Amino acid sequence: MYKGFLKRLFDLIFAIIGLPFLILIILIVGPIIYFQDKGSIFYNASRLGKDGKVFKMFKFRSMKMNAPDLRNEDGSTFNSEEDTRMTKIGKILRKSSIDETPQLLNIIRGEMSFIGPRPDLPEHRAFYEGIETRKLEIRPGITGYSQAYFRNNISWKERIVNDIFYIDNITLSFDLRIFIKTIVAVLSRKDVYNPKSDNLENVLDKNRGEDV
């Protein structure tokens, strides 16, 4: 019962309770994001949701406007502290995970949950193998088992294994443990960036080569 109705009910209740705090964050952070480069406050990213449905995931914009989409050799998104695409306020938002708070709106819209697999890019669906498609059985989450316990220290494929483990073991107590672990991880600010990300110059060279 929890995996279906109750989990969604709790998501909706706590997301609505969190709305005033989100509005306050927008009022404080929004003008800073805008005046740094006169760009949009939000970044709306296409992501894979439940049953493979593509939706727009809301985030505070942490990168410069029209920043190129850089990928590591394995196709994963480039994520490094040396990333020159990030704005000054963007680095703070990324380290504190404040950039993720607008996803409360995705929860209210029924596209996301507080706890669940981190949503993949739409093009990643072509790389799922075997039971990896099971990742799409539930709503993706703002945080989850992999994010809380491993953050950016494991590969994309390892995260999918953890996602399926979570799906097979969803309980209220498990979600509470993940939530508490997430708070600890965010406050410690460890492993925000992927230590396995390729060197920035190599990624830029690869990107230029694909543009030729």
Image (tube, helix red, strand yellow):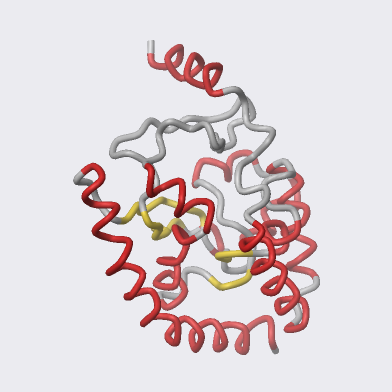
Instruction: Relative to 66, say whether 118 is above or below.
Output: below
Q: Quadrant of the N terminus?
A: bottom right
**Above or below: residue 43 compared with residue 126:** below
Residue at image point 28% right, 55% down: 32
Q: In this view, does 54 lie to the left or right of 43?
A: right
Task: Identify the residue at image location x=33%, y=61%.
Answer: 29
For residue 165, above or below residue 196: below
x then y, percent, for residue 47: 47, 53
- The quarter of the picture where residue 167 lies is bottom right
User: Quadrant location of residue 108?
Assistant: bottom left
Q: Position of residue 177 (x, y in %)?
A: 75, 75
Count every numbered label the image shows and give the total: 0
Query: In this rendering, would 107 be left or right of 178?
Result: left
**In which quadrant will I find the C terminus?**
top left
What is the x, y in percent for residue 127? 63, 39
Using residue 199 as the reference point, say whether residue 19 is left or right of it. Answer: left
